[in-house]
Image (cartoon, grey):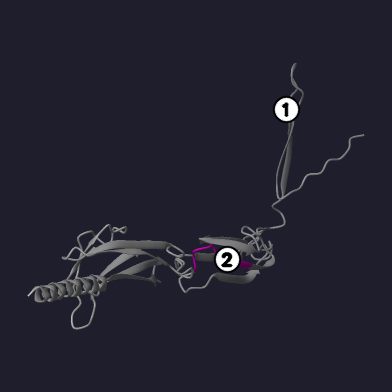
Amino acid sequence: MKFKKILATIGVTALLTGAGLMAAQSASAHDAFLTGSTSCNTADGSATATWILSNDWDTAATVSNSTNTVIPNGTVIPPKTNGTNGTKTFVQTIAAPAAGVSVTASYTATWPDHTVRDIKAVKVTVPSNCTVPPAKDASAAVTITAPSCGVAAVLHLTGTNVTWSGTADGTPGPKTYNSKATATAGHTFPNGDTSKQFNGRLAGPLHYQNTNPHAPCYRPDTDAAASVSVSAPSCTAPAVLTLTGQNVTWTWMRSL
């Protein structure tokens, strides 16, 4: 009789030990994962980080101790179903310029049987080629003031978000001009070009003529005029010479 009791005790102990091993194995099978990836938004140079939380156990897991605000504490990760891990996805926006920016996330997963797993931090970095595209707002134009009688044509350069090289603004004719507008950093012309070239000829002044009164720049030969006036001296001021004239030049002659 005593022998049977001993055997029974051994059997119960073995059953309990086996149950303990099964429980340990079940607990050890609980696990959760975290993966992250980034993608560039080429339209504006921002980026998107995608976080996927994964649960490989047949009961849901609850998130706590999240280190990234885009993953809220209390998030429930669905259970594993038909051999496929349950997942929860979160999207994080990274403002432009996003190139080279890194973001991290980590969390703790807890199952209803109080199994706990601390998921280590995962870091993702936006590629350096995720750059802000240039604004297509550069502009450039050349205008020329037409020549007039005795006055040459003048070059005028205007533009926004550009720098000029070559023939300078305000250059008068007669001259060939060659001016280049280059878009400043972060800008292009509306068609995507980074520079524009302008070439042409600046005319010299229109010449006066005295043969056709109805044609431009007519000036008769007999329209020259000149006069001299001298103010009277006073006790405190000397006499003053005043020269006036039209279509004349003045030169000084030494008095004897």
The one of 107 and 143 positioned closer to us in this rendering: 107
For marks 1 and 2, the one nearer the N-term is 2
Residue plotted at (46% across, 64% down): 100
Q: Is residue 115 left or right of residue 240?
A: left
Residue at 19% in and 75% down: 18
Q: Which residues are magenta?
A: 179-188
Amino acid tagged 1: Ser
- Quadrant containing the N terminus in the rendered view: bottom left
- Asked if residue 196 is positioned above or below residue 147 in the image, the reply reads below
Q: Position of residue 55 (x, y in %)?
A: 24, 72
152 or 128, which is in the foreground? Answer: 128
Rendering quarter of residue 241: top right
Q: Amino acid at mark 2?
A: Ala
Give the class, few, some or many, for how many residues have Cα within 10 Å of label 2's Cα (few <14, many ≥20): many
Is 183 contained in the magenta span?
yes
Q: Position of residue 181 (x, y in %)?
A: 57, 66
- Viewer-closest of 61 and 127: 61
Residue 160 drawn in magenta: no
Left or right of 256? Residue 143 is: left
Q: Residue at x 35, y 64 (%)?
A: 120
Q: Is residue 166 visible?
A: yes
Q: What mark, if any, has residue 181 been given in the picture?
A: 2
For the residue labelled by badge 2, is the local secondary structure a helix, a strand or a loop? strand
Q: CA distance from mark 1 to mark 2?
A: 57 Å
**Residue 71 placement: quadrant:** bottom left
Total labels drawn = 2
On the image, numbered disc 1 is attached to which residue? 231
| Image location (x, y in percent) of residue 76 | 19, 66
Marker disc for residue 243: none
Residue situated furthest bottom in the rendering? 82
Picture quadrant where residue 177 is located: bottom right
What is the secondary structure assignment of the residue under circle 1? loop
